[in-house]
Amino acid sequence: MSRPSRLAFSSSPRNSRGRCTAAFIVLCCSSLGCTAAENASAVSVVAGDDMAKGVASDGGGVDDSLAPTLSPEQFDSAKLVLDHEPEPRSGTTGIVDTRGSAWRLIEVPAASNEPSIIRTPLGWLALSRRAIGNPRTPSGWQSVLYRSTDGVHWNTVPFAPGRDDLALSDIAYGAGRYVMTGRRWGENSGGVFWVSDDGQRWREMAQPPLDFSQLLGTVDFAGGKFFAFGFRVLGISEDGENWTVVGSDLVQFGAAAYGNGRYVLAGNGPMLISEDGSSWRSAPVDCAMPGACITDPSGNVGQSYQLYLSFVDGHFYSDQMVSDDGEHWRALPDRVPAAYVSGRFIGGSGYSLNTWTPSGSLDPLLVIRPSEAAVTAARREITALGVLDAGAPLPDSVAVEFEDGLTCETASCVIVGSRLYLVPPVGTPPLPDRIPRDAEGQPLLSSECPFSTMIHCEDYAERVECACQPEAPAKPNYCQDVSQFECSGAFTPRAGEWQLSEVGAAGCSCDAVDPNQPAGFGRDCSQEADDCEPPLRCLAIDPPPSVGGPLGPARTICTAGCGNDGDCPSWEATGYCAGHVQLRCSAGSCQPRDCQ
């Protein structure tokens, strides 16, 4: 049986993470005459050579096959439109059908963490980067730009082949121009812009002179202007090449919007307001509004980080607030719009999305991530969506196909926050949801609880009333002695789910006591008090393996002194790792047992 989504790639021998993009960009293919792909169930991997021919930073020729898939006029007017308008029902108006099959998270390829994703007339673009060598002290950086016209087949745009000193962090499109921000390392270190008129041929230029901490790392486009942001500085440009830099009260940037004749910028700090995009004034928000402000560990109250900002139908929206002018805000509790399509807002992240109209109630959207990469130990964290193998060369092409052949050309796709979702046309049979879930439909495993041992439920068979306890041991060797490991239940993998080793024992702790072992063995103790039960004594044991830092004080437990293994206790163990136990002697004390 074929799997719902496949991650396939090829790599050329020539070719050996960033903030959430706040652009509210949507795509309608069904309204532009897209047709279903032939032989949709076939899996194909495209080599990167065709892209290498047409995309060059040296001004080489352009392959006709790389012409924009949409005209700027089509792109500017694109909306998320489903094939058939649903019947009206309470809580759902317009054409976003929350009754249809689940929205699908697309595994957009990334070098590390999340890519910066935008939709342009050239197609979808995803920019990411990765450190070379030790991430803490990298010997270099690689940046990669992937392009796709259908959302599931991605090819690299080799804008800087062979470069290992380039860390690009963000990308924006506007007024027919593409702009990337980042920095170069090494001898010519400093901030850089990469600019292109067609998304294929790029030119590099230096950022204005700034301190290292102030280099412009994020970029957005609104109201005919590009805005680039560093620490308390703001860069402004109409063409992406000529920049004016001014001071800013924003410590960290969230988003830019234009409407009602003014520009508004949001982030970590007060709102910034301008009528001309050059002169700015600060507008702090009222901390009495829900979510508007936070209190730091020192007790200081400050404006919370506003990640999203949009202008819709005469109003600015920023996280849980709405405003007519960007200066005076009203509370909009529980609504954090990250996208606006078909007359509806969409908010949330990952598997938890909601949709609502400006005056309507919240409707949940069912979201799945139908790929085995979504639930394996190495790729489970939501921040690792689509991340490629760290130790391998970045592939020239990546395919993340669904078994029913749907793509962003045969269905609608939308960016919500920094993730790309495919919205199946109404009437599409749902793909099998192979992610292990609890009774409420939430993923059983998550970045907070990556092992079922950490999940405690009222009923493990039905997966009812489950809660995460991150402090619970992930594995037996997380306990001071494996004999202390016990679990209150177990999950049985269900038919159709990915069969994972992580879904098994559940509700585990280190509270067990093996009745056959010496009384009190393994209990932490103090050598001064030495309250161990005879014949055990409070003795130091071997330290854990060093991880490179200084060793802490030796751990002491209730154990026995010894000259060899024969002097140590032995017994027939019960519970976890049941069987014969012979403790090991080291440095005059019997060591806690291991599970062989």
Image (cartoon, helix red, strand yellow):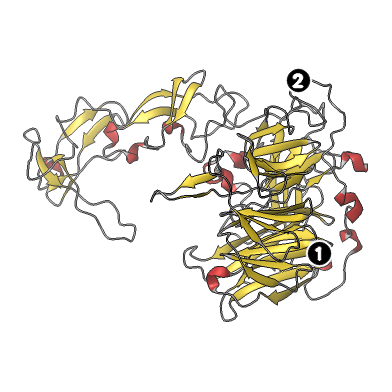
Q: Quick check: can you spot residue 402?
A: no
Q: Quadrant of residue 165?
A: bottom right
* Circle 1: residue type: Arg
Task: Answer left or right for 101 relative to 437.
Answer: right
Measured as percent of width and height from the top left, residue 166 is found at 63, 70
Which residue is drawn at the image coordinates 76% and 27% (left, top)? 100
Asked if 580 appears above or below 118 in the picture, the reply is above
Asked if 367 appears above or below 43 in the picture, the reply is above
Q: Nearer the viewer, residue 41 or 287?
A: 287
Measured as percent of width and height from the top left, residue 430 is found at 74, 28
Which residue is drawn at the image coordinates 43% and 50% (left, top)? 300
Which residue is drawn at the image coordinates 49% and 31% (left, top)? 503
Which residue is drawn at the image coordinates 64% and 60% (left, top)? 281
Task: Answer left or right for 167 relative to 341.
Answer: left
Dot 1: few (<14), some (14–19), or many (≥20) neighbours within 10 Å?
A: some
Q: Which of labels 1 and 2 is toward the front? A: 2
Q: Which residue is mark 2?
A: 90
Q: Which residue is mark 1?
A: 177
Dot 1 or dot 2: first in sequence order is 2
* Circle 2: residue type: Ser
